[in-house]
Amino acid sequence: MTELGNRPPTTQCACAPPLHVDLVSSGTDTGLRVDVRLEGELDLATVDLVTDALACLRDERPELVVIDLSALRFVDAHGLRAVDNIHRELCGAGGRLVLAMPSRHVARVLAVAELDPQISVWSA
């Protein structure tokens, strides 16, 4: 058994990635639906992950994109701008965006931000 004083100091970090993005596409009778789940923080450091993940959908022209915000802990102005840009791009291609189940903090930010009223927010 080793005494505490003889052991080198250790550091443990249980750091989660700042943002995790999951995409699931499914066909519907009206077109393509894409469900996106964001987990973590959507800010200047992570906004490119979302825009890059959704860039692959430009050619597919989904009818509906639902972004699940239930596991999103934080969003800043850069994240809101990305959401607005996604919305504009979808509308331009005949699709629509829905933000689903925002956490309490994210819901407050969305309310203050006054996003385009055409962006639906589904709450619990």
Image: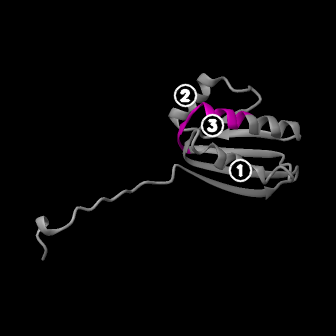
In front here: 118 or 50? 50
Instruction: Find the distance from the CA under tag 3 to the CA under tag 1.
Output: 13 Å
The three-letter amino acid code for the residue at tag 2 is Arg
**Of circles 2 and 3, which is in front?**
3
Instruction: Find the distance from the CA under tag 2 to the CA under tag 3.
Output: 14 Å
In front here: 78 or 20? 78
Q: Mark 1 or mark 3, which is nearer the start of the sequence?
A: 1
Is 20 positioned to the left or the right of 34 in the image? left
The three-letter amino acid code for the residue at tag 1 is Asp
Q: Where is residue 29 in the image (x, y as percent from the top left)?
A: 87, 53
- Residue bounds of the magenta highlight: 71-84
Location of the N terminus by quadrant is bottom left
In this figure, which residue is indicated by the disc labeled 3? 79
| Residue 76 vertical placement versus 30 (above, below) | above
Residue in view at x 71 percent, y 57 percent = 24
In this figure, which residue is indicated by the disc labeled 1? 52
Residue in view at x 63 percent, y 24 percent = 113
Is 42 positioned to the left or the right of 93 in the image? left
Q: Mark 3 or mark 2, which is nearer the start of the sequence?
A: 3
